[in-house]
Amino acid sequence: MNTNKIKSNKELTVYLSKDRINTRIKEIASELSENFSNDNPVIIGVLNGSFIFLADLVRLFNFDCDIDFVKANSYVGKESSGKVKLDKDVSIDIKNRRVILIEDIIDSGLTIEFLYEHILSLSPVDITIVALLSKKNNYKFNFNIDITGFEIGSDFVVGYGLDLNNKYRNLDSIYGLKEKN
Ligand code: IMP
Ligand code: MG
């Protein structure tokens, strides 16, 4: 959906267009296709935000994979609560499998750090982290984000899976949000 039909007291401005997103997703898919051609990895999407990114990305892979999801939560409204909890764990046995962890956005890094440690404890061969967006100024940890779609500033963005209180996820581009005067 585009923004024409949205009833909201917020002003939405295009931050990353669907064309820019699609171009970058093709690049990410070819990079992963080179690295995982014979490895049958497990793709683990972080719900809810990654569902559209994951759906677009995995359909461009030219390798076999299994797909599962985890759900973690640290956000209330526009603020991180500072604590992460696991609402849904993986259901596939990932021991001795290669894992690709797909996240929508990394802000403080709390969520991805928690999930990385958790998935590591399940003894995969390795974990490749792919994030569509990252707010690089906001986080610091001692492992790599292997692939980032776009590095952005500290602005709060919605669309293409990303929400504000579960709204705006079905927009096909990524938008910045401002209160309307
Ligand atoms: P972190 O734990 O602070 O890195 O936050 C990560 C989670 O917060 C993401 O998975 C998103 O669900 C949410 N989040 C962070 N920044 C934004 C944003 O700008 N828009 C929408 N959701 C966000
Ligand atoms: Mg999320």
Image: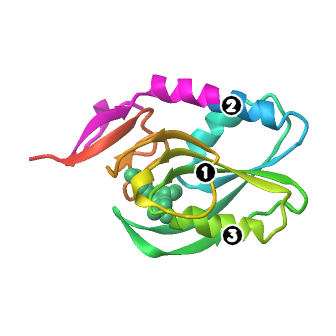
Measure the alpha-carbon separation of dots 2 and 1: 16 Å
Mark 3 nearby-residue class (10 Å; few <14, some 14–19, many ≥20)? few
Q: Describe the element under mark 1 as helix, strand or loop.
A: loop
> Does 162 sit above or below residue 59?
below
Question: Residue 34 sits in which quadrant?
Answer: top right
Name the residue at the front extreme: 142
Residue 83 in view here: yes
Measure the alpha-carbon separation of dots 1 and 3: 14 Å
Three-letter residue code for mark 2:
Ala
Residue 135 in view here: no
Name the residue at the left extreme: 181
Observer-nearest of 142 and 91: 142
Residue 153 placement, left or right of 177: right
Q: Check if residue 109 falls in the magenta segment.
A: no
Tell me if label 3 and label 2 are in contact, CB under 8 Å.
Answer: no
What residue is disc 1 on? 145
Look at 60% across and 51% down and name the residue there: 145
* Residue stretch in magenta: 1-27
Q: Describe the element under mark 2 as helix, strand or loop.
A: helix
Circle nearer the viewer, 1 or 3: 1
Quarter of the rendering occupied by the N terminus: top left
Residue 29: image tag: 2
Q: Check if residue 17 falls in the magenta segment.
A: yes
Three-letter residue code for mark 1:
Ile
Measure the alpha-carbon separation of dots 3 and 2: 25 Å
Three-letter residue code for mark 3:
Glu
Residue 28: image tag: none
Q: Describe the element under mark 3 as helix, strand or loop.
A: helix
Instruction: Indicate which disc, 3 or 2, sits on the residue closer to the N terminus.
Output: 2
